[in-house]
Image (cartoon, helix red, strand yellow):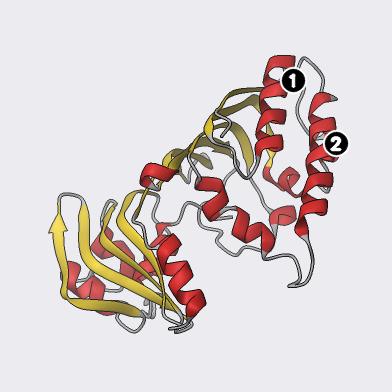
Amino acid sequence: MLRFAPYLAVAFLLGPVQLVAEDNPAPLRDCRALLKAVQSEVTRTPETTAEAVPGGCRFTQVGYLLEGMIEYRADAVTLLTPQLLATFPTEAVFKSADLSIQGLRILPRTGNAMSDYLTSHYSKPINIELVYDTDPATLTAQLKHFSFDAGDIGRLTLFARFSNFDNTDIDYTGLGNEMGVLHELGLAIEDNGLLASYVLPLLLSGFSYDEDPRPVLAAQKIAVSTAIRALPESLLSSVSAESLVRFVTAFPLAHGNWTLHFESEKGLPLSALDASSLDDFAALLASDARITATADYRPD
């Protein structure tokens, strides 16, 4: 799991941290020193800047080159967190942070027809925001706000609340081994092509080149819809169930507005997200769990 660590998002654009943690490392001098500390992987332009802003640092025209083939470039990256320049050299995870990535573009560098196609489809700017807060003493955490805004093709927003959540444990070994309990989750999607552009390619990557994914996806849609309708009314009302079925049926052309809200004071172990089926997942839900969903589907 992400552990809410914006290091991952910073590494996404500024490159992996190359510092060697010391027992008592000195704070970085300024935001330019922070940029220099990760310069081995960062891509820059003559317009690249690093400047202090209240609560943190702002970087402009920075990017990250993945395996020499795809560049992730942003107009601006702003990271606000307490004691940023002192904490960064220690390689400790930030207890709280407000991260903003503006004008993010995915720019393939293969120089062939596929590169041209990907550039035309994915070079549109994306804005990402991540705001979280954790309390190490009580092992509680809040994902206050996450948004993925792709402009005219749609946006996704998310918030969540956790307990028994160790923010310092960033060694990911699979969902089945995740600690932490989810108590609340809110998801909203405004789709004008968002899922078809950014989610469907990830799903299709799991199929072989000569395999037709349509029969498999159609069968999965039927199985998931049947399982959703079988969930108890105490967990999911018939209206919410049909909203979810409409979403599943419409995917990936889910043009419209969709919301999902989960809440449980007893909570859901994060390891349950590794359940092999929707039935197995439902069996792990606490008795006080409630799920609501809405759908405003706009057929083409």
Label 2: which secondary element: helix
Q: Is residue 249 above or below residue 237?
A: below
Mark carried by residue 56: none
- Say which residue appears at 53% left-offset and 42% top-offset: 139
Q: Is residue 223 left or right of residue 59?
A: right
- Foreground pick, 124 / 73: 124
- State the image coordinates of residue 2 (x, y, percent, origin top left): 53, 55
- State the image coordinates of residue 85 (x, y, percent, origin top left): 24, 64
- Say which residue appears at 14% left-offset and 59% top-offset: 52
Mark carried by residue 235: 1
Amino acid tagged 1: Leu
- State the image coordinates of residue 261 (x, y, percent, origin top left): 58, 27
* Pointer 1 local density, CA inside 10 Å: few below 14, some 14–19, many at least 20: some
For the residues labelled 1 and 2, the Cα–Cα distance comes to 13 Å
Amino acid tagged 2: Asp
Residue under pointer 2: 279
- State the image coordinates of residue 103 (x, y, percent, origin top left): 29, 56
